[in-house]
Amino acid sequence: MSGADSPEVLNRFGPMREYRSMARSFAHLSDEAVVALVARSDQEALAELYDRFGRVAYGLALRVLRDERLAEDAVQEGFLAAWRNADRFMPERAKASTWVLTFVHRRAVDLVRREERRRAEPLSDTVEPTPSESAEEDAWLRFERERVQAALRQLPDQQREALELAYYGGFSQSELAERLGQPVGTIKSRMFTGLARLRELLSEPGHGETAWKPTPSTT
Amino acid sequence: MEANALHDLTAAYALDALDAEDTRAYEAHLARCERCRDELASLSEAATALAYATEAPQPPPELRARILQQAQRERGNVVPLRPRWLAPVAAAAAVAACVAIGLGIWAATLSNRLDQRQAELNQQERVAAILAAPGSRTIAFERGSLVVSKSGEAALVVHNLKKPPSGKTYEAWISSGGASPKPAGTFDGGDVVAFPLEGSVEPGASVLVTQERAGGVDAPTQKPILSVQS
């Protein structure tokens, strides 16, 4: 799903000539198995993990930080945290994608909280889509984006607002309470109800994960 | 903060919407509260779905190379190795495999002294057997995991534990109910420490680690540096 087989990506990582064959051998592995290899200090596995989630991670960090350099820092530190902590990953607790994106998100939130000047800016999603090297990945990301956005649209406005300001804005619950002029208890309950409802919506058939998944390129 | 108030922080924690102080309090609570761990697992998944709702432009190509270079700088000297005794573990639950991976690194740092090595290999075999036993439970804590088999045999895995000062050792204890803690073995620090506990860990019992004088003592004399409830 990552475009790891495309020549552009391979050439970029010049020194590791074996990468093409290595990448192929990862294709059938689950995300969780890739993390288990990362825990063995397997650098190729880290590259694979990045190829699977680096783009979503970067998009997320950019949304939170709205600054390319800071977003790169958050992604880098998030993946290195995954590298350092992979032996503590517990597949029964979290999907590998959730686990790695949590590191990146936490780092992005830390950074945005230090960047007070950005906080006053509006929170619109201003990022322009750029052409991808892999049409397949594009299609899958677009599918996921539409699926989650559709679920978000079904939430009551106040719940969606609380989730978006917290997750994309990096606001803490007490900052949100102040910004929205509500008691902290109200904010907590909007976040909880919103997240629980989002979870339900995403697991419903029609919103849920369909059998449609990109297959790795075989060329 | 009261426990009830802490339960209510799960959604905010999943969204990274707690300040530093609340985060610390919640994480300490999380180590003790299974209900919150379960709820957090499912709410985190929903929170992370929000990552997919944004546009995702391609990151600059240099970023990938930079991450890989930095990763190698941090841990370039570690060669993955697969000792033969790990083979049965590979078939065990994925979580056990993850702990065993830590063991692989640990095995690489073993001393060459043959007698010590033999003793440690025996320990590794016992640890591997506990990890691979069907129905073994893993209790994760901040710096490692406690794995308890159905029969109460237990292995403790601890990460990044400094070597004790000379003349000192780490000593593990098993504390059940109101009884005084029983000695469960001594060990030195290291990047990854994994060893079988002496004595049985009943459900609800706690495992503690203190620093004591070399050779170990009969009852703990220091405050525990870690404590985990099975």
Image (spheres, coloured by chain):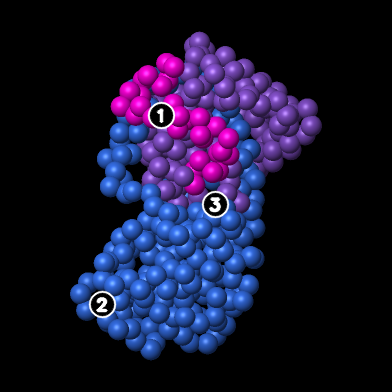
Chain colours: A purple, B blue
Please state the horizontal and vertical placement of residue A16, each as a whole percent of the image: 34, 29
Q: Which label number is shown at residue A90?
A: 3
Q: Main secondary structure of the magenta part?
A: helix
Please state the horizontal and vertical placement of residue A109, each as a whole percent of the image: 44, 35
Tag 2: residue type? Lys
**Residue at image mark 1:** A19
Q: Which residues are magenta?
A: A7-36
**Residue at image mark 2:** B168
1 vs 3, front mark: 1
Query: Is there any visible trace of residue A18 in the rendered image?
Result: yes
Side of B123 where B177 appears, left or right = right
Output the chain of dot 1: A
Q: Report how far apart the C-alphas of labels 3 and 2 lie in the structure.
A: 33 Å
Please state the horizontal and vertical placement of residue A78, each as a whole percent of the image: 41, 37
Please state the horizontal and vertical placement of residue B22, each as a whole percent of the image: 48, 51
Labels 1 and 3: the sequence-earlier one: 1
Instruction: Tell me, yes or no, whether the highlighted magenta stretch contains residue A17.
Output: yes
Outermost residue on the left side: it is: B166
